[in-house]
Image: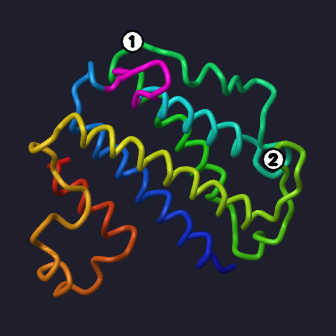
């Protein structure tokens, strides 16, 4: 059974998971929970929302609607003053649910139908919708973390002034290589 497409999608999810972790590793515990105003989100709110979304969508992925009755989306954006360990536990909960659901999938499954909010979608559509949703919110986390760090920010992408060196190393453009590079830059 082939998993070429599924593994490619999974690699992109892993890239964004690593980006989020790389960004969160650079902020203080206070900054994880800092809200700028009543209308802005803190990193903790984005984590809660993304984790809630992933857990809801991918728990019983093929057999139940992706918007679970237990999910309280509105509360995901509530202000929280919690520890880094609690933030990261919530983060892992969402990603673990996702990766557990992806593990048995084969490329031949991608035409099968799942539902999200009572809408039928092919699995490939649901995955593309989800990976772009994750990328959007991880981008927000990176943006907030970068704002907090300012000049002390450690790049999670190609550092400024390093494009030529990066281009001389074929193979660094894969999602897995990018995730490994992020962990390497941060010494984790």
In reply to whether residue 90 is colored magenta, the answer given is no
Quadrant in the rendering for residue 21? top left
Residue with the mark numbered 1: 81
Residue with the mark numbered 2: 116
Q: Hey, which residue is sitting farthest top in the picture?
A: 81
- Tell me the SS state at disc 1: loop
At a point 34% along the width and 17% down the height, the residue shown is 83
- Residue 8 in the image, given as x and y percentages of width and height: 53, 72
Q: Residues within 10 Å of mark 2 (few under 14, many from 20)?
A: some
Which label number is shown at residue 26? none
- Residue 9 in the image, given as x and y percentages of width and height: 56, 67
Q: Over which residues does the magenta segment extend?
A: 32-43
Classify 188 as above or below 68.
Answer: below
- Residue 23 in the image, given as x and y percentages of width and height: 29, 43
36 or 28: nearer the viewer: 36
In this rendering, position of residue 56 left or right of residue 115 = left
Q: What main secondary structure does the magenta stretch of the protein show?
A: loop
Classify 127 as above or below 22.
Answer: below
């Amino acid at each position: 059974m082939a998993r070429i497409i599924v593994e490619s999608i999974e690699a992109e999810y892993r890239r964004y998971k690593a980006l989020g972790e790389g960004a969160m590793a650079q902020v203080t515990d206070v900054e994880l929970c800092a809200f700028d105003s009543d209308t802005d989100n803190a990193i903790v709110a984005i984590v809660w929302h993304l984790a809630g979304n992933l857990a809801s969508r991918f728990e019983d992925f093929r057999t139940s609607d992706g918007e679970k009755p237990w999910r309280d989306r509105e509360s995901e954006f509530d202000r929280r003053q919690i520890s880094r360990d609690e933030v990261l536990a919530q983060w892992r909960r969402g990603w673990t649910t996702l990766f557990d659901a992806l593990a048995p999938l084969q490329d031949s499954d991608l035409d099968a139908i799942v539902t999200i909010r009572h809408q039928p979608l092919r699995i490939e559509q649901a995955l593309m919708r989800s990976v772009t949703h994750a990328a959007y919110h991880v981008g927000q986390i990176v943006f907030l973390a970068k704002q907090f760090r300012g000049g002390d920010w450690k790049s999670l992408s190609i550092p400024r002034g390093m494009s030529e060196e990066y281009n001389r190393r074929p193979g660094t453009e894969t999602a897995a290589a990018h995730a490994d590079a992020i962990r390497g830059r941060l010494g984790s």
